[in-house]
Image (cartoon, coloured by chain):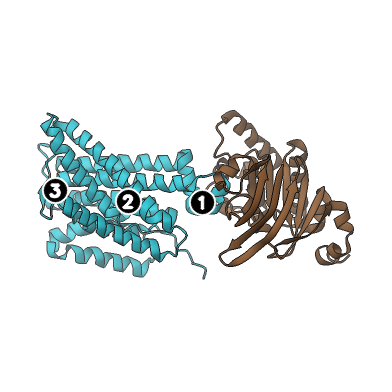
Chain colours: A cyan, B brown
Amino acid sequence: MEYFLELFFGGLTRGSIYALIAIGYTMVYGIIQLINFAHGEIYMIGAFTALIAASALSIEGFGGWSLLVLAGFIAIVYSAAYGFTLEKIAYKPLRKASRLSPLISAIGMSIFLQNYVLLAQTSDFLPFPPLIEEFSFLEQVTVMRSSELLILSVTAVSTALLTLFIKFTRMGKAMRAVAQDKTMAMLLGVNVDRVISVTFIIGSTLAAIGGVLISSHIGQINFYIGFIAGIKAFTAAVLGGIGSLPGAVLGGMVLGWTESFATGYVSSDYEDVFAFGLLVFILIFRPAGILGKSTAEKI
Amino acid sequence: MLEVRDIRTFYGAIQALKGVSIWVTEGEIVALIGANGAGKSTLLMTICGVVPPRSGEILFMGNPIQNLSPDRIFSLGIVQVPEGRRIFPLLTVQENLDMGAYLRNDKGAVRSDMEYVFSIFPRLAERRRQLGGTLSGGEQQMLALSRGLMARPRMLLLDEPSLGLAPVLVATIFDTIRHINRDNSTTLLLVEQKAAMALHIAGRGYVLENGTIKLQDIADQLLCNKEVKSAYLGGS
């Protein structure tokens, strides 16, 4: 039972990170029908920024929670700036092009950003400092680590805040309106460019939060982590139903558990087999994803 | 109030408007009639900045607006209720109306405008928590018109407000349009295939054919015009 719980919370942690990244995929897809393949790189850049910021800040004497919060904040600002710029440079000029062009541009940006970090930093794994403090009340608990609890809570709080934002604020309503009918939103005075920028900033912010937390949990990063996490989170988004926010969270959790249990009960070698096997399985029986609405596309 | 001078608009290589000029003075209702594909909707989209013209000029209150973005043009008070209603299907009736007031910050006035549209269309008040996509065609048209009104337009561009509606509803919609014009002194540019009804409430009218203005006159004259009669009024 204890082993099961350990795997359960491990899966939930993984799932939370996948969910945080998947939200970025699903929101961008919802608004401009683009799979932003460079999204994983934003997560990776968040992790690297936090590493650099934490190193610098700890020299300045920061430590404990303030170090995590400050480094995390800097990572968020950087990642959001990258996400914002990415859209302006790589996608906005292609807005009127065929759907394939921005997709290729996205893959190009993904490769570019990976190599940019590879050159600017290193190809080796770098140790990531454990920024998350241990909770004293978890000392007796063996099935869950402090960092896991923090990742879970942060994910829950940020997705709840995002849901409220989308449901109740003026910008949130505009985002939903743009997702449903861009031209009509324009005709009601919505600055569509700004809505798209905000979407990228929100997605990048969540990806950065995920990047900082999971790196601190795992303890090492390299330039390639964004690609792997990005592909997995994209899988989660598709699994849950791309374009659906609750779908992204659910997809992330399902994927996290699948991997965790496959690793724990079968073998860690089969982790990806189970993850993508599940994707194929879902796509056969529910092509629109678990929570996705099947839309008959008019040809 | 609005002056469109010799605009030419293209969709890719296809020229939809081949030098169209119209003008609308403050407070009047102008009808724009024409067959399918004549370029009526394109003209409205061009005025609103969604499909900018390749050449020509559009003046609103004396200022050129042909190079402004749609949201800027909207903020000047030019509001379009487009063809096909284009209700946001997954927003509630209430949220659809909120979107009409998207740029407004005068909360109190927004609330009283909301009450005003609910008083014209009580059906919408009953269904305010329902999703837009679940409304019937007639209700959607009421919602589309109300959403436009929530913007407090100085000039309202209506594209086929009667399309696909039962005759009883068509009369209601046209009544409302006349009210909007009279009560709020909102200037109206009305695109309609139901030419007779449109010309009855309009002061002047234009006939658009193949991307050019074929005829223009005061509405009563157009109603008597032989060509208009045979082509757009069912020959009676």
Relative image position of residue A152 (x, y in whole percent): 24, 43
Quarter location, residue B72: top right
A106 vs B17, nearest the viewer: B17
* Label 1 Cα crowd, 10 Å radius (few <14 / some 14-19 / many 20+): some
Relative image position of residue A4 (x, y in whole percent): 15, 53
Disc 2 and disc 1 on one polypeptide chain: no
The disc numbered 3 marks a residue on which chain?
A: A
Callout 2 secondary element: helix
Q: Can residue A132 be seen in this view?
A: no
Instruction: Give the residue number, with chain letter if any, for mark 3.
Output: A218
Callout 3 secondary element: helix
Quarter location, residue B178: top right
Q: In this view, does A57 lie to the left or right of B182?
A: left
Q: Is residue A9 left or right of residue B217?
A: left
In whole angstroms, how far apart are the C-alphas of marks 2 and 3? Answer: 21 Å
Q: What quarter of the picture does the C terminus of chain B occupy?
A: bottom right
A258 vs B171, nearest the viewer: B171
In whole angstroms, how far apart are the C-alphas of marks 2 and 1? Answer: 20 Å
Q: Is residue A58 visible?
A: yes
Question: Which residue appears at 34% of the width and 67% of the height?
Answer: A283
In whole angstroms, how far apart are the C-alphas of marks 3 and 1? Answer: 40 Å
Tag 3–tag 1 contact (CB < 8 Å):
no
| Amino acid at the residue labelled 3 | Ile
Question: Which residue appears at 76% of the width and 43% of the height?
Answer: B25
The disc numbered 2 marks a residue on which chain?
A: A
Instruction: Give the residue number, with chain letter if any, for mark 2.
Output: A249
Instruction: Give the residue number, with chain letter if any, for mark 1.
Output: B90
| Amino acid at the residue labelled 1 | Leu
Q: What quarter of the picture does the N terminus of chain B occupy?
A: top right
Viewer-nearest of labels 3 and 1? 3
